[in-house]
Image: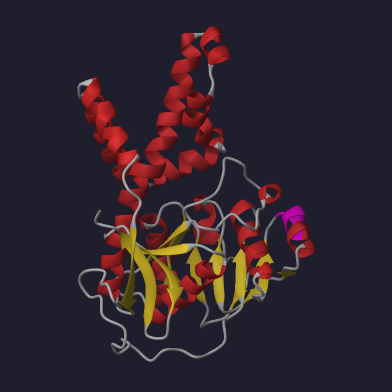
Amino acid sequence: MADTAGPGAAPVGGAPSFPVPTMPAPPVGIVGLGQLGGSLAAALTAAGRQVSGWDVDPAARDAAAARGVRITREFSGVVVLAVPLPAMATALDGLVVDADATVTDLGSVKVPVLDALGPVLGRRFVGGHPMCGTERSGHGATDPQLFAGARWALCLERDTELPRWLRVAEVALAVGAEVVPVTAAEHDDAVAAISHVPHLLAAALAGAAAEAGPLALALAAGSFRDGTRVIGSDPAFVTAMVEGNARPTAAALERVRAQLSRPWPDLVATGHAVTTRAGDRRTVRVPLERAALLALGRAGGAVHRRLAAFVEGWVPGEG
């Protein structure tokens, strides 16, 4: 690349870290056809990928079939678990999965899912989490554009097989997402701060406003709506998410409490500076090697294209 992404990045023309697969894109099977799974199936079908799916809800199966998804209990290629966190460990029960299939998930926490599925699936498992979705749920909330422009965290553990990681990354790229290489622990620490704590703060803000009385709720407008939107999500989903990531969420919440104890002018100025910072990006090419890919993610960057011996992406600009 003309630019590098820090440690491990290399210029165009460097050697690949492993033989680059040339096989056609594998089929994708999706277990769970609610908002995320149904949206992924619809987006992949629109992109020309071969997609099959299953859901315990007949209505979700019928809705997916109407969008061109083949409904089956047999899967191969890349298998995506798009089920609630409490159901993750049993999601494949009663299904037939090819012995060489790569399995990934869309769960909002990664360490507990890795702990549950890693011993069973071994190196076949690649944890993932697309940072998208709305407060709506179920197959009625399907949106084939849901992933366009979204960040998709994809876990690279020490024993992750890079060709499998790339297969999952290609699924994310096919629906318009940008891939952020992370470890499961790094992911959980990060999303505690930018997703899980905001859900708790939204709940606290709504509860405090209710205690202020009917007049306060009657006057609530844009800032209150924006600040409380996410707590309109299914309470069971939010509870499973924050309890499944309890330690990092508690630590992130303590950082928020510390911020709130600062003098208000300093607090406001700091927050304003963070949210209005420059959004410049610098294009980089990174070799297909774990340390280099993780360096890209840790720098705040993402992958947006697969090349032969590299991935192309971006990191935040320095200006």
How many marks the image carries: the answer is: 0
Q: Nearer the viewer, residue 247 or 189?
A: 189
Could you say which is closer to the camera, residue 2 or residue 153?
A: 2
As drawn, is 315 to the left or to the right of 237? left
Residue projecting furthest to the front = 319
Tell me what residue is drawn at x 62 percent, y 51 percent. Answer: 35
Check the image and report above or below for 154 versus 233. below
Q: Which residues are magenta?
A: 57-61
* Quarter-of-image position of residue 297: bottom left
Q: Tell me, yes or no, if residue 161 can be seen here.
A: no
Q: Does 239 appear in magenta? A: no
> In the picture shown, does residue 110 fall above or below 53?
above
Tell me if residue 260 comes above or below residue 118 in the rendering. Answer: above
Q: Residue at x 47, y 20 (%)?
A: 207
Instruction: Judge from the rendering whether residue 296 lies leftward or rightward of residue 237; answer left or right.
Output: left
**Residue pictured at 48% horizontal, 55% vertical:** 107
Residues 271 and 40: in front is 271
Left or right, residue 172 beside residue 28: left
Q: Position of residue 38 (x, y in %)?
A: 65, 58
**What percent of the width, then of the height, locates residue 223?**
48, 26
Return the x and y of residue 129 as percentages of the image width and height: 46, 58
State which quadrant residue 300 falls in.
Answer: bottom left
